[in-house]
Amino acid sequence: EEAKRNREQQEIQDRIHGFETALQMLEDMKYRSADADSLVTTAITKLGELYGYTDTEAYRTRLEQAIKRIQTLPSESQWSTHQAQEKSGAVSRGAAEQQELYRLYQTERYYWNQPQSYGPGGE
């Protein structure tokens, strides 16, 4: 009897986990992907498997929000362009910071070879 209840509880937990995994994939979307339709229908199907086993209202609300959110996401090409621009900006900033460090190094290095001198980094 208890083994049967444990199996039923495990089945419910597996169903919940399956739905939560599908929902998380939707919630984690960064752009409108080609598989958005498939992800949505999978999540809806998985939610249907929970009816009668657990309270589904909170899950239903999250799924509705995830579905509505998809239209606000950029297309894959827009997202890729934005990512490339961010990377390019980071590379440019990094190059400028690197140049500053080289200038600092050159200035300080001059004083490394002058033990009697006190330079900008000295005491």
Image: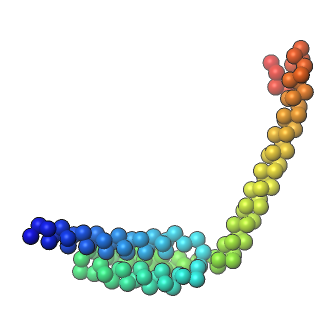
Residue drawn at (35%, 80%) of the image:
47
Which colour scheme appears in the figure? rainbow
Residue 121, percent from left and from top: 82, 25
Count of marks overlaid on the render: 0
Q: Is residue 119 visible?
A: no
Q: Is residue 79 left or right of residue 106?
A: left
112 versus 103 height, above or below: above
- Quarter of the image where one finds residue 31: bottom right
Residue 48, percent from left and from top: 33, 83
Give the quarter of the figure containing the N terminus.
bottom left
Residue 40, percent from left and from top: 46, 82
Residue drawn at (80%, 18%) of the image:
123
Which residue is farthest left?
Answer: 1
Q: Is residue 54 left or right of residue 39?
A: left
Residue drawn at (81%, 45%) of the image:
98
Residue 25, percent from left and from top: 48, 72
| 4 or 88: nearer the viewer | 4
| 115 or 7: nearer the viewer | 7
Which residue is farthest front?
Answer: 3
Which residue is farthest top?
Answer: 116
Q: Is residue 102 visible?
A: yes
- Quarter of the image where one finds residue 58: bottom left
Residue drawn at (54%, 79%) of the image:
70
- Quarter of the image where one finds residue 72: bottom right
